Amino acid sequence: MALLLRELGYPQGTDQQTVHWVVSHPEIEIFVAGDPQDRPVGMISFSHRPQLRLRGRVATVDELVVTETWRRRGVGRALIKQILERCKVLSVKQLQLVSPMASTPETRSFYAACGFSEIDSGVFRHLETEEGRR
């Protein structure tokens, strides 16, 4: 997972403690796609939780990455399909995905082709909780 996260643009990747924490959490799920030799070539993680205003569960795609050599081969679509199937099982009322404003046109087209629609939304972060606090 650390290598996939690095490819996603997070040079620190992750650590063993966080991986254990995430995979043991009941409201976070990770699906990994492998090549014929069972090496990871893609990963999607999503979290789901009840939300009052939706009167049901909301889910968020937290990370989605496919290694560069495996892009445009259906891996990303298969991972999204896996999440959509889980959303049906969990009776999710809304699936969301937050993509950086700097996303490439290809990334935006991919999300649209998978059924996501860009909406007017603001993402706010509390700066004191950021890892590199001043």
Image (cartoon, helix red, strand yellow):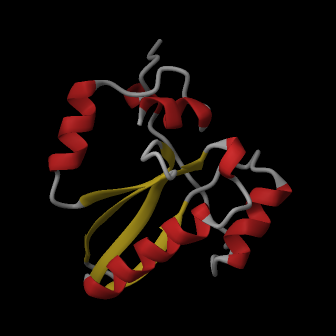
Q: Quadrant of residue 15?
A: top left
Instruction: Pick out the residue farthest to the front.
Output: 37
Q: Quadrant of residue 111?
A: bottom right
Q: Nearer the viewer, residue 60 or 76?
A: 76
Q: Nearer the viewer, residue 32 or 53?
A: 32
Relative to 48, 84 lies left or right: right
Instruction: Pick out the residue farthest to the right.
Output: 105
Relative to 125, 113 lies left or right: right
Image height check: is 26 above or below 112?
above
Count every numbered label the image shows and give the total.
0
- Is residue 132 among the parts visible in the rendering? yes
Image height check: is 125 above or below 2?
below
Q: Position of residue 99 (x, y in %)?
A: 63, 54
Image height check: is 107 above or below 93?
above
Q: Position of residue 32 (x, y in %)?
A: 41, 53
Relative to 34, 103 lies left or right: right
Task: Please name the residue shown 81% across and 58% down the image.
Answer: 106
Task: Please name the residue shown 76% across and 63% down the image.
Answer: 108
Q: Position of residue 69 (x, y in %)?
A: 70, 44
- Is residue 54 among the parts visible in the rendering? no
Task: Please name the residue shown 46% across and 17% down the image.
Answer: 132
- Quadrant in which the N terminus is drawn: top left
